[in-house]
Structure formats: C-alpha cells, structure tokens
Image (tube, rainbow, N blue to C red):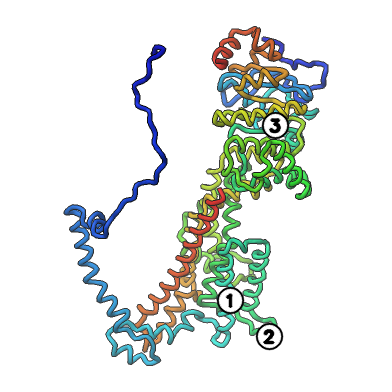
Amino acid sequence: MANPNGSDNGREPIIEFRGVHKWYGDFHVLRNINLAVGRGEKVVICGPSGSGKSTAIRCVNRLEEHQEGDIVVNGIELTPDVRRIEAVRRTVGMVFQNFNLFPHLSVMDNLTLGPVLAQGVAKRDAEEQAAELLRRVRIPDQALKFPGQLSGGQQQRVAIARALMLRPEVILFDEPTSALDPEMIHEVLDVMTELAQAGMTMICVTHEMGFARKVADLVVFMDAGEIVEAAPPEQFFEAPTSERTRLFLSQVIH
Amino acid sequence: MSTAPGCVSRAVVTSGPRRPPPQRADSAMAWLKRNFFDGIGNMLITFGLLWVLFETVPNLVRWAVLNAVWYTPNAEVCHAAAGACWAIVPEKYRVMLFGTFPYEEHWRGVIVIAIVLGLSVISTVRRLWSYWLFVAWIAAMAVVFVLMFGGVFGLKPIETHEWGGLPLTLIMFVGTVVGGLPAGVMLALGRRSTMPVIRALCVGFIEIIRGLPLVTILFMASLMFPLFLPEGMTIDKFMRAQIAMAIFFAAYAAEVVRGGLQAIPRGQYEAADTIGLNYWQKTTRIVLPQVMRIVLPSMMNEIIRAFKNTTFIGIIGLFDVLRATSTAIQDPTWVRYSIEAYLSIFVLYFVLCFAMSKYSERVECDLAVRR
C-alpha cells in the first residue's frame, strides 16, 4: 500500500485516522484507515461507490461511529462522550450531497440558526455574518427566499455558507456536486476553489477530477474499504502505482 | 454505429412558435350529454337519481320550510301545523345551550362562548400569528376560568357539576386539544427514544389507550378512578373527564405525529447535528415544524373527531350541548318535537366542524406556498 500519510509531514495534523476499522453488521466497510490531514491541507477522496469514502469522512464528525482505532480531530479524540462529539462538531463544518437545508426556514434563518442557538451569538451579529457569507458565495439577494425557491447550485452554495457560519477549522464535503445538473456544478466548484485558496482545511469526497488536480494537496483513492493509493495530484494522475487506481482513473477521466 | 461524415440523419427536426393551449369550447347541452347522458348505463343512473330527488326533495321542503312553524310560545300551534316545529329552538335554546348552568348566570356562559369562538376566528388570520396571540390565548383562558368558576370579583361561585351546554363543550374541547396535543407529541418522541424504558412506557401507554373504547376510559375515569385515590382525596368529575379525554386524544395524536416523524429525512437530523444543535433544539426548531406541516390534514381529522367526541361526556353525567338538548326536550308539551331540536344541534356541530376543516385547508395552502 502506498504511504497513506499526509503529504506535508512537517505540519501538525488537524485530523488523524490511526488504524480505523468500521463494520456495518458483518460488512467490513473501513479497513485499517490511516490518514493525517495537516492544517490548511486539501484532501480529495475518490473511489468507486461503496468504497467507504463517505463513511470515512462521516466518522470525522461522528455522524458514523468507528469501532476500532483512533480518530483525533483538532486534538480531541472521538469517543462516545457527548461533550467531545459536540466539541469536534464545533470545529468541523459539513456540506452534504443533498444539501440538507431546512426547507421550512428562510435562507437567512438556515444560516443564523446554528450560531444563535448553539453558540449564543447575537441574532443581529449572526445576520451580518450571514449577509457577508452570502455575498462570498455570490447569492447576496436570496436571503429571504426559502430553499425550495432556489436552484440546486444556489442551494448548495447556501449549504456551504451555512457550514462556514460556525467558523469551522475544517469543512467536509460529501459529494457536493453529485446531485447537481451539469451547468450548476461549476458555480459550486468555483466557491469551493475560492475557499481552498483562502486557506481552509478541506476533505472532499468527489468525482470531480479536474477540481482534485487543481486544488488538492493530496488525492486519496479508496476501494473496498481500504486506502489503495494516496499521493499529491501530479503523481496520482500521472504515475499511479496501483493497478486498481489506473483502472478507476481510466473510467472517470474521459 | 456512427454515421459517415456528410451523412445527415433523416429524422425531421423542427419546432414551432409559442402559442396558448387549445380552448375546449363546450355548450351546456354538450356538457350535460358528456357528464350525465353518456351511454345507456349513465342515462339509467341519471334518471334513477332524478326520480329519487323528485320523490324526496318536495316533501322535505314542505316539512322543513313551507308548513313549518318558526316561532310560537304555544306548542298547540305546532300541534295543528303539518310541518316542522322550529319554534322549539327559541323556546328551549337557553337550556340547550347552557344545560345545568345556573339560569341567571347564563351571561357568563355567553362571554365564554364569545371569547373562545372570537379568539379562534382571530387565530385563523395568519398575519396576526405572533407571540401576542399566544399571550392573548393565555389571558383569555384565565378570564374563562374566572367566569366559569366565579368566587372572585363578586361573581357567584359555580361548581363544575353545574357547568353545561356549549361553554362546557367548548372548554372540554379546547382542554382536550391543548392538553392532549403536547402530550401526544411527547409520546411520539418517546416512542422513538433510544432509551428502552421510556420507549416501552410510551408504546405501552399508546397501545393500551388505543385499544380501549373512549366510553370505557370515561367510565373508568368517572367510576373506578376515585376508588384508587387515597381516603379523603377527590378530583371532581369534570377534571377526571377532561383528563380522560386529553389522554385519549394524546394516544391518537401520538401516532399521527409518529407518521410525520418517519417522513423527515435522516439528512435533516444530520445537518442539525453538524451545526451544533442539541436534541431539544433539533426537535423543536428543525423536526417538529416540518412534522406538523406534514401531519396537518390527519391531525385536523383527530381534532375534529375530538370535538365530536365531547358528546361522550354526556354518558357519565356531564351536560354537554347534546345532553343538555336531550334534557331540554323532556318537557312533555314539546317532547314530540325532539327531531327539530336535534337537527338544530346537528347544524351547530356541522358548522363548527366544517369551519375547522376549511381552516385547516387554508393553512395547508399557506404553508404550501412557502415551500
């Protein structure tokens, strides 16, 4: 197996997987995952469906529970302890494939609910911050609309703004463009690219190999619950060491 | 197979300018023919139904309108007439509407009815939904309790066993929903709890209550429950009936809410988790608002049923509108006109139920627009 550690070993890792295993019933979905993500690093995880890539990032904020090994996020080791889970969730934002915006709340309320309720931020401050973030994701005039009134691309950008509201140290993207029509993929990827350039630590599960090539510090290929290959993009795309990686790349790059 | 260069597909590809959809021009005769006389079967059904209407409607109109007596203090006049005797309503309406409520205190009942119905109507205007409307309801309930119980501000005290008629029906109904709905929501949440003891208690409670007829629950509350209480402790009959009604409503409301909870996608919970909401914030701000929207039609069904179920309290000796009406027509001079008295009470029930049904329809539309 290729060296699964982060490309930049000089920096202190903000997320670290050490020998992580997970089973769904008898199904061994994560097999000995070792991965260290440094502060400010961008990691893209790719792989065929069912390879465990979404499960892996969902373990980072404990939407899924791992059974063996350690996951340490920002110095906090994830255990069943609710306070630790809450502390980790405060530092980790997440963007989902299906947006998961709250359909009964306006865009503004979708953004401000978390900071106001969970962090006790004053409503007016939260609204100012939300307006600023909506400008940043280029939908400044949609604050009073409801999610159902927006296009898929706009909804996903609202979801990114919502994840940024808690000023996270890391953002997890779980196939953020897979539910979008082709013409909307770019507006979302552009926002993600800007975020990456601003220095955000990101882990993205995605099939957008162009994005991976342009933005990633490390590309991880997973298959059948294992990390098969992990390398900087130049090496990953030009000289993959594993046969499985080559086969996968030949299928996703046209 | 790919086409050779220079070869053009033979498929005809064209499109046209924008135009409005075709209008269906339809004469009245064509409409009648299409809907009522289309084929021998439909013709038979149409003529059959026309015959039934011809046989019944004129008789009904003659009885209910043409030959009816609308107002007379004298039952003999009704006796002489061939039609309905609506005069029983002006003659007996105070007993029908207030039952055993002390006669000279009926004005208090009128205010109670006005407050409950008035606030209900105001509450239907979505523009007025606010914190203040909630406060208004709390204040109104306080006023209703003062008026009903009396004993302060020089009001004559009225015992709950003297309560009756429409004020009793409305109070019982509002109390059932206000007490039962939150209890139902808690039961539904408890049924999905990860804590086995809480889950078992909620499931057991819901299944037992749903497995019993309302009448038996009311009999238990009224006859058996006092036997379990310690010596010297009593809870009055009205409160016992009120609690029984609320519990019964809660069990059904819980299952309606559970259906809604199952319709909320897992992603909503996960998104709420990732923005740091705790269980109660997640439940009250994300889950329940969406659940209530989903279950509105079936919840309104239960609420309307709860309103009609208030007639059951007559069985354990409380004088709701229906029981008060049966009492009112005991008067031997008027007893033969009980049908007219019941019909007018039916109209009262229908108007209130229909209003609730229309209201929920409108709320559904309002909420649908905002999706």
- Please state the horizontal and vertical placement of residue B280, each as a whole percent of the image: 68, 48
Q: Is residue B30 left or right of residue A144?
A: left
Q: Label 3 is placed on what type of residue?
A: Asn
Compared to A106, does B168 lie above or below? Answer: below
Q: Residue most toward the left?
A: B40
Q: Are the residues at dot 1 and dot 2 in contact (C-beta closer than 8 Å)?
A: no
Chain letter of the residue beneath label 3 in the structure image: A
Residue linked to disc 3: A61
Chain letter of the residue beneath label 2 in the structure image: B
Q: Label 2 is placed on what type of residue?
A: Gly
Q: Say yes or no: labels 1 and 2 on the same chain.
A: yes
Q: Mark 1 or 2, which is nearer the eye?
A: 1
- Please state the horizontal and vertical placement of residue A197, each as a whole percent of the image: 75, 26
**Label 1 crowding class (10 Å Cα cut-off): few <14, some 14-19, many 20+?**
many
Residue linked to disc 2: B154
Residue linked to disc 1: B112
- Please state the horizontal and vertical placement of residue B2, each as a whole percent of the image: 40, 14
Compared to B361, does A201 lie above or below? Answer: above
Q: In front: B88, or A230? A: A230
Residue located at (63% from left, 42% from top):
B195
Residue located at (78% from left, 16% from top):
A8
Compared to A55, does B170 lie above or below? Answer: below
Q: Say yes or no: labels 3 and 2 on the same chain.
A: no
